Image: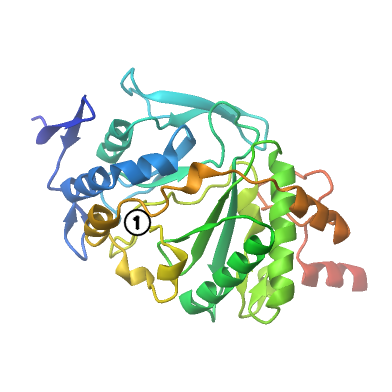
Amino acid sequence: MASPHTELLVGGRTVRLTNPDKIYFPRIGVTKRELMEYYLSVGEGVLRALYDRPTYLRRYPGGIEGEEIYQKRVPPGRPEWMKTAEVRFPSGRAAETLRVTEVAAVAYCVNLGTIDFHPWPVRSCDVDHPDELRIDIDPQPGTGFEQAREVAFAVREVLGELGMTGFPKTSGGRGVHVGVRIEPRWDFVQVRRGAIAFAREVERRLPRLATTAWWKEERGERVLLDYNQNARDRTLAAAYSVRARPCAPVSAPLTWDELVDAHPRDFDIRTVPARFAELGDVHAAIDGRAFSIEPLLEWFERDGGEDMPYPPTYPKMPGEPKRVQPSRARDEADG
């Protein structure tokens, strides 16, 4: 027997919604239909966040308590109108990924069980040169959103001194993301080095609260500035993405004024549509100006030009220090 379905008209495209009453978030009773309605209600905003970017999908066809499919390659059997982009992984292998150019593509992916959308910081015309610097403010054990917020305002201060504008959003968890549009003139290695230099400057100003330490044993109860989110093939949840957590939180764009007293619990699949209807996309100006990272690259050299470890899944990278946790390196030296 065919599964129950309905058809939606999205921007002139017909998109099929199968099993619309399937429960995706059991704790709060959110169905697949409600997930689709959410993404259509914030369509302008999520399209701005994803537009023309290679995008990965976190799919949960059985709901968030079922199997997760982290899909990097474009879904098979897609309609002919959906666009793709070729990306190259750190291993050197290449793949065709989804390239979102219209809200109907978002809707099509939601029907496949997509909850989170994870775009690359590049456009399809030049997938080797990021147009976004991503500052990931990630609370570690013993810290939370309050500490992440304090670090975020230090980030804003440093950006202001550089003449840059950052756009904050909740991560959908305890953290804060700040996006900065940059000129697509530098490759991933250079942009990551700029992120390292920026993170080191914030760490200098808040040494008891912020850290760049890649190794968990060195972080303590501090907030990590995760520079590695700027490495090739690393992605963050897009603005307006629902997160696959029990209460369906959203990675919500904010103004800096709102961040002063905002809390992640305020932004979820049921509250953000009304907010969007009232305010529109508060990050609508994000593409208005792109900035140079030359000052950050100068800071990187000022600090000695020393690189930092990549994630363990990456091949050994040029200039990368020895990839071994400090306690193990000391044990090897002592032995």
The quadrant holding residue 28 is bottom left
Q: Position of residue 125 (x, y in %)?
A: 56, 26
Q: Position of residue 111 (x, y in %)?
A: 25, 38
Depicted 56 relative to depicted 11: above or below: below
Residue found at x 33% / y 24%: 78
Residue found at x 37% / y 69%: 264
Residue found at x 43% / y 62%: 255
The residue nearer to you, when weighing 275 against 161, is: 161
The residue nearer to you, when weighing 53 against 73, is: 53
What residue did someone put label 1 on?
244
- Please state the total of marks drawn on the protein image: 1
The residue nearer to you, when weighing 194 against 247, is: 194
What's the residue type where badge 1 is placed?
Answer: Ala
Residue 214 in sight: no
Q: Position of residue 197 (x, y in %)?
A: 75, 59
Which quarter of the rendering shows the N terminus? top left
Q: Position of residue 165 (x, y in %)?
A: 57, 55
